[in-house]
Image (cartoon, grey):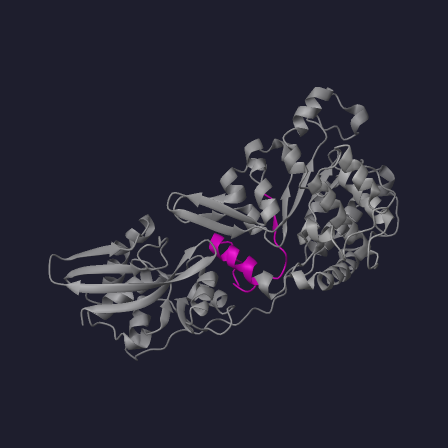
Amino acid sequence: MSYARVLCVGLAGVAGHLVEVEADLSTGLPALALTGLPDTALNEARDRVRAAVVNSGRDWPNRRITVNLLPAALPKHGSSFDLAIAAAVLAGAGELPPAPLDRVVLLGELGLDGTVRPVRGVLPMVAAAARAGITRVIVPAGNAREATVVPGVTVRAVDTLHRLVEFARGEAALLDPPAAPETAEPPGPDLADVAGQEIGRYALEIAAAGGHHLALFGPPGSGKTMLAERLPSILPELDDDAALEVTALQSIAGVLPPDGGLVRRPPFQAPHHSSSLAALVGGGSGLIRPGALSLAHRGVLFLDEVPEMGRGTLQALRQPLESGRVVLSRARGTTEYPARAQLVVAANPCPCASPAGDHACQCTPLVRRRYLGKLSGPLLDRIDMKIHLLPVRAAQLTVATEPAEPSTAVAARVARARTAAAARWATGGWRVNAEVPGHRLRRPPWRLPSRDTAVLHDALEIGVLSARGFDRCLRLAWTIADLDGRDRPAVGDVCEAYQLRMGEPTTRSAT
C-alpha cells in the first residue's frame, strides 16, 4: 500500500479544525514534500519525523513521499502534527497497519530519538475532535490528564513512536491517563489582611458581585494592590463551561498547571507596566498567542502603575472591554480569543507619589494632569467605579482591634447576589449585571422610575455623564440592590452608583 490517511487537529485561536494527514509514496527521487499551508515549525517536521522513524528502529522508505494536510486552504501551525505525519508515512510504507488508527486523532511532537513530547492546546484540539464525532484520541503522555477533561472521548497516551507502532501491530498497549491528583489548591490572599479601607473593600465586593470594572487611586501603601490581589478570593468558582474556556486558553498559552485538570479558580493576571501591546492583548507571527487580557478571561486583569504603561497599549483595551473578545487580524487570517475579564487598574495620584497624600505633593497641577492623562477619557468611561483611597492611619495598623472580615464571608454575599442576578437574567443568558445590555435596563419591565434616576438624567443632560456611563450606573444600582437582598434598586442605590462612578465620597461602606 502506497497511500495512507490519519487524523489530526489544527488550531485557529481557540477553535479547532479536524485535519486529514495524507501520505502518498511513489517512485522518484527520495524526498518528503509537505503541502497544505504549513508554517515554519511544521515544515521542519520533515527532518524530525525522518530521524524519529529511523531512531525508533524502523526503515525510512527510500521513495518520493508527499504529505498533504486537508483542508489545504487552512493554515497549519506548530509541531502537533509530527506524530500523525509519522504514522501516515509508516502506514503508507506498510510498516504500520492502518486499521487500528482509523477514526483516531493523533497529536504529539516528535523528538529525534522517537520520543513523543507534549504540545500546547491539546484540550481545545480534543474538544474539536469530539465536536466532529471522533471518540478516540492518542496524545502525548504529558498531555493525557488534560485531554481527559473533554467528556465522551476515550483518551490513550504514548511516550514513544515505537510504542505507537507496536500498538498498531497488536504487540503492546497504549498508556492510560494518570488519575486526578488529590491535593487541594492552596488558598490565595485573604481580605482579612487588609487594614482599614472600608470603601475600598465595599467597592471590591460590588465589583465581584456584578462583574464591574474598578479603578483604584491613592498614595503608595494605601492598599490598592492588596485589594486587587484579593478580588479572586471573593469570586465564585468557575462553572463547567467557564472552566473549559479558561483551561483551553491556558493550554494554548502553555501555562496550564502540571496536573492538567480543569481550572476552577478565576484566573488573575497582573502584567508588568512595561508589557508590550502583544503581551497584553495577544499577537505573534504564525500561531497567534493569547495575551494577558484573554488569559484573564472569566477572572481579573490587574494593571498596577497604569500611568506608566504605554498610551497605545492602554487604548487597545477599549474594544475588548466592550465586546468581551479580542480579534487579531493578520495577512494569513483572523484569530479570535475570548476576553471577558474584570479590569482593575491602580494608580498613584501623581509622579512624586508622596505617602502623606495630596498635602505633601510637590507636583504642579499640570504635571498631575499629564501623569493621569495616560488614562484617556474613552478608557475611563468603560470603568464602572473610580475609588480614591486615603492613606492608612497608624491606629489601623497598630491598635489591636477585631480582625477584618475574611474573604469567605464576603464571598458568601457575592454568591447570593450573583445567584439573584443570574435568575433574573436567565432568559437572556447573562451571568452578571455587567453583561446586561443597556437597552434592556431602559425598557419595561426593568426600567426604573424617572424619579429614581433623576440624578442620572441631570448628569447626562449637562454632559457630566455619557450614555455609556448612564447604563453602567444602572448596572451598578442593580448590583447594590442584589447585595442588599432587594428585588429592584431604589433611588438611594442609583445615587450611590453615581457616586461610585464619579469617584465621589459615599457614606456607604462594607459591613
Q: Quick check: 299 above or below 179?
A: above
Residue 462 location (% of width, % of height): 77, 32
Residue 141 location (% of width, % of height): 42, 66
Q: Depth check: 389 or 56 in front?
A: 389
Residue at 78%, 44% (x, y): give it: 200
Specify the quadrant that holds the N terminus: bottom left
Q: Depth check: 340 or 251 in front?
A: 340
Q: Tell me the quarter of the picture where residue 457 sits.
A: top right
Task: Answer whether residue 177 is magenta in the image.
Answer: no
Q: Tell me the quarter of the picture where residue 104 sits.
A: bottom left
Q: Is residue 171 left or right of residue 311?
A: left
Q: Quick check: 145 above or below 217?
A: below
Task: Answer whether residue 245 is magenta in the image.
Answer: yes
Q: Is residue 33 left or right of residue 142?
A: left
Q: Depth check: 336 or 253 in front?
A: 336
Q: Tell me the quarter of the picture where residue 261 sits.
A: bottom right
Residue at 36%, 77% (x, y): give it: 173
Residue 307 location (% of width, % of height): 64, 32
Asked if one can make out residue 154 in the rendered structure from this viewpoint, the answer is yes
Figure label count: 0
Give the residues in magenta.
244-271
Q: Is residue 166 left or right of residue 351?
A: left
